[in-house]
Image (tube, rainbow, N blue to C red):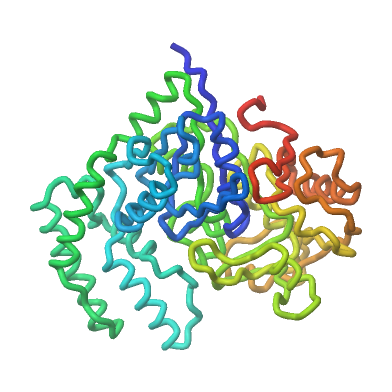
Amino acid sequence: MTPTGRNVVVVGTQWGDEGKGKLVDWLAELAQGVVRFQGGHNAGHTLVINGKTTALHLIPSGIMHPSVTCFIGNGVVLSTEKLLEEIAQLEAAGIEVRSRLRISEACPLILPIHSALDIAREAARERGGNQKIGTTGRGIGPAYEDKVARRALRVQDMKHPKRFAEKLEILLDMHNFALKNYLNATPLEFQPMYDTAMAQAEQIKPMMADVSRELNELWREGGNLLFEGAQGSLLDVDHGTYPYVTSSNCVAGNACSGAGVGPQLLNYILGITKAYCTRVGSGPFPTELDIHAEGSVGRHLSTVGAEKGVTTGRERRCGWFDAALLKRSCQINGISGLCITKLDVLDGLDELKLCVGYELDGERIDMLPMGADEIERCQPVYETMEGWKESTFGITQYDKLPMNARLYLQRIEHLVGAPVDIVSTGPDRKQTILLRHPYLAH
């Protein structure tokens, strides 16, 4: 049998918070399976459906569709505590979750010791006069460290109490030593952590699965799959603004290793990008504007765009659109098409600036360089375009957009070499302009 399913990967192309949740929810209408393939509960996706807002951190956004099966792939580091909290919130809203959620047995677990390490390390950096990385303090990095060091407890270990206890004891002994002797923090006790994990295991067991096998079988039967990335491409541990990055690979290619599928299954890569730039946490940001100056463009982007992190509530840094950054993202993801979000936030601005490249060490470059040290020295080179006074909020037809808004989108296409296939003009799934559908494009 020749599989007839078509699969789409959704990735952020900036530093996260681009609006992926809405697009995943919107595309899930044509999917049978939605897959989360990396990150942890440091990510946050906000969905607005018929005016009601739902924030998700671990469960794929497709959970809002009753006919969709949702998968958490092996590339995710999993806090069972936060997962069960999220399930309870959705169930309270009348959404059936447990029968439709499949969790890879190979997911590394995030334990309280990981969060303790994360917080203590950031505090130590601050005490030592070093700039903090800007982590969420949720233990994501330490959990990935344990995975790579081959000492992680995984979801499948929860089925074996004796094995879990033995591994946990060894892990705690090592991490508590670091907490006490190097980070001046309080060690954590074994018994409460073990008892909590074993109680949670009883709820998690029915959702454990061989996710790789189930995804491949669903595809062979003709099902459409949707792979949901977390964070943004410039937070990728290899290709981002290192060391101010997350601890996983956020690029589209990681959908394969993070879910257990072959690259032939990835038919279309949708890159989500804001019509301007934002960033949470530390790290270089070439086009950054002052968001606190009254009456400034930065203040406009921050307030009109409601730029606060879904997971942490932290204020997002804001700046002009960076085409040189997006050009890098298109390259490392193999972007098939772009979705431009929050176009309506630019309404009313007299002029718009697009960063088309940088001056670095006396030379002009047209693509974001690798690593924070190089990017810190980049001076943005701008083009200026006329803004528009008309409202674009809620528009669903491309030819109804103001001419200057269309020229802005066309200039982005030309600069980065990728087509704009979708434009989002508001937070609700209905507030979308479709030029080419990822599931129908060939």
Residue 283, position in %: x, y?
57, 71
Residue 175, position in %: x, y?
23, 71
Q: Residue furthest top?
A: 1
The answer to whether any part of residue 327 appears in the image is no
Instruction: Give left or right: position of 398 versus 436.
Output: right
Residue 407, position in %: x, y?
87, 48
The answer to whether any part of residue 69 appears in the image is yes
Residue 90, position in %: x, y?
42, 48
- The residue closer to the viewer here, 333 or 55, is 55
Q: Is residue 275 above or below residue 171?
A: above
**Which quadrant does the N terminus fall into?**
top left
Q: Which residue is drawn at 24% across and 81% down?
A: 186
**Which quadrant does the C terminus fall into?**
top right
Q: Residue at x 28, y 44 (%)?
A: 106
Q: How many marks?
A: 0
Q: Residue at x 48, y 83 (%)?
A: 130
Image quadrant where residue 361 sits: bottom right
Q: In this view, does 43 lie above or below 406?
A: below
Instruction: Give left or right: position of 312 versus 202.
Output: right
Q: Residue at x 46, y 44 (%)?
A: 60
